[in-house]
DNA sequence: ATGCCCAAAATATTTGGA
């Protein structure tokens, strides 16, 4: 019978298997701050109890260029689960051990040069799958799923939706076809009737109020009517867009171009979103954008978006 | 109407981003 012990100074507990305890086991000792947490230890199941699960999505724009900023962010903001986009790395080159040493389980779906998504989690993951169903020919790494095994299991999907510019054109056709596949996956997810979410860089500006200068985006693949309609079709299945469930009004953005001093003028767009199934929306505490990260050294052009779930 | 800036692969310039 497993023995459950509290982890000192945190909301975590650890279930220790027979024959292991915090004093005797080299690896279990990691849970008590003696050594760095070693989440790969098979003798322990780590659970978070009586506290919210904090999940963030973050388009990091290249893992190699973002190592310092990402590490600082994980240390300071400490997401339980981080869904990363644009790792721009193949799986073999992703510095997984660096993040494992910080206490994260690392699952990647990488690609050379561009795209690539990943999940970092302090909570055990099950049933990890890679790739958006619906097109076996699609080589682009834009989708990863896993079940976060906290007190209430949550199915999380991390996504990097195609940009689609220039529109119209083949890249835009690919975007719309990808969104059709997203719609199909979203429908299946809803039919499971479990807490689940789809989060990431949607490359969709949902409404005029989600851009500082909507007129400048009128014909862009991120804002043109066909794109917004495709996004709404997914929402209309029954998803809750977490940010707009908690915050109304303009001037809330998640991306600012590197060019032309966009950040300093708050000339941004809101394109990174959380879509929640009804069972997940019922757990929603808060949702916010960590915009101040954009003003730091060597930032990504995106900032993290967060949800807090009573799970 | 276009570039501004940035990352990656390659190693000078192109591709992709949004």
Image (tube, grey):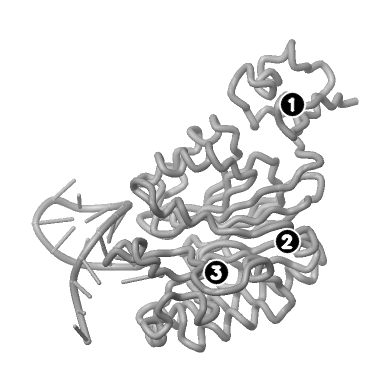
Q: Earlier in the sequence, mark 3 or mark 1?
A: 1
Work out how far the residue at label 1 is from the one at label 2, CA to CA, in angstroms.
28 Å
Residue linked to disc 2: A196
Asked if the residue under mark 2 is in contact with the one under mark 1, i.e. CB atoms within 8 Å, the reply is no
Which x, y percent locates residue A245? 68, 69
Residue linked to disc 1: A7
Q: The N terminus of chain A appears in which quarter of the rendering?
A: top right
Residue linked to disc 3: A136
Question: From the viewer's perspective, is A58 left or right of A192?
Answer: left
Question: From the viewer's perspective, is A239 left or right of B16?
Answer: right
Question: From the viewer's perspective, is A190 left or right of A198?
Answer: right
Look at 84% across and 27% down and name the residue there: A4
Up/down of A166 relative to A83, above or below: below
Look at 38% across and 54% down and name the residue there: A112
Numbered disc 2: secondary structure: strand
Look at 55% across and 32% down and name the residue there: A102
Work out how far the residue at label 2 is from the one at label 3, CA to CA, in angstroms.
24 Å
Up/down of A246 relative to A73, above or below: below
Numbered disc 1: secondary structure: loop
Up/down of A46 relative to A91, above or below: above
Q: Earlier in the sequence, mark 1 or mark 2?
A: 1
Which x, y percent locates residue A231? 58, 79
Asked if the residue under mark 1 is in contact with the one under mark 3, i.e. CB atoms within 8 Å, the reply is no
Label 1: how many Cα within 10 Å (few below 14, some 14–19, many 20+) = some
- Which quarter of the figure has residue A16? top right
Work out how far the residue at label 3 is from the one at label 1, CA to CA, in angstroms.
44 Å
Asked if the residue under mark 3 is in contact with the one under mark 2, i.e. CB atoms within 8 Å, the reply is no
Numbered disc 3: secondary structure: loop
What is the chain identity of the residue bearing mark 1?
Answer: A
Camera-side residue of A191 and A84: A84
Q: Is residue A38 visible?
A: yes
What is the chain identity of the residue bearing mark 3?
Answer: A
């Amino acid at each position: 019978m497993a023995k459950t012990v509290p982890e000192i100074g945190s909301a975590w507990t650890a279930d220790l298997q027979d024959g292991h305890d915090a004093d005797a086991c080299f690896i279990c000792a990691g849970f008590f701050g003696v050594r760095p947490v070693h989440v790969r230890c098979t003798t322990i199941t780590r659970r978070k109890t009586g506290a919210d699960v904090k999940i963030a999505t973050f388009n990091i724009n290249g893992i190699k260029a973002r190592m310092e900023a990402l590490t600082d962010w994980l240390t300071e903001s400490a997401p339980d689960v981080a869904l990363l986009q644009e790792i721009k790395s193949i799986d073999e080159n992703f510095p997984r051990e660096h993040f494992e040493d910080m206490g994260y389980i690392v699952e990647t779906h990488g690609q050379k040069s561009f795209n690539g998504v990943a999940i970092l989690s302090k909570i055990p993951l099950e049933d990890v799958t890679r790739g958006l169903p619906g097109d076996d020919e699609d080589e682009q790494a834009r989708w990863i799923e896993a079940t976060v095994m906290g007190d209430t299991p949550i199915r999380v999907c991390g996504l990097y939706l195609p940009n689609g510019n220039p529109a119209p054109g083949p890249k835009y056709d690919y975007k719309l076809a990808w969104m059709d596949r997203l719609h199909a996956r979203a429908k299946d997810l809803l039919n499971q009737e479990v807490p689940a979410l789809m989060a990431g860089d949607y490359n969709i500006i949902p409404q005029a109020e989600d851009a500082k200068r909507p007129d400048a985006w009128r014909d862009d693949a991120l804002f043109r009517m066909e794109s917004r309609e495709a996004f709404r079709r997914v929402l209309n299945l029954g998803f809750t867009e977490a940010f707009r469930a908690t915050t109304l009004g303009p001037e809330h953005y998640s991306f600012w171009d590197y060019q032309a001093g966009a950040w300093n003028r708050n000339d941004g767009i809101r394109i990174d979103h959380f879509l929640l199934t009804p069972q997940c929306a019922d757990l929603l505490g808060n949702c916010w954008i960590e915009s101040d990260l954009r003003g730091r050294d060597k930032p990504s052009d995106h900032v993290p978006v967060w949800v807090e779930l009573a799970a």
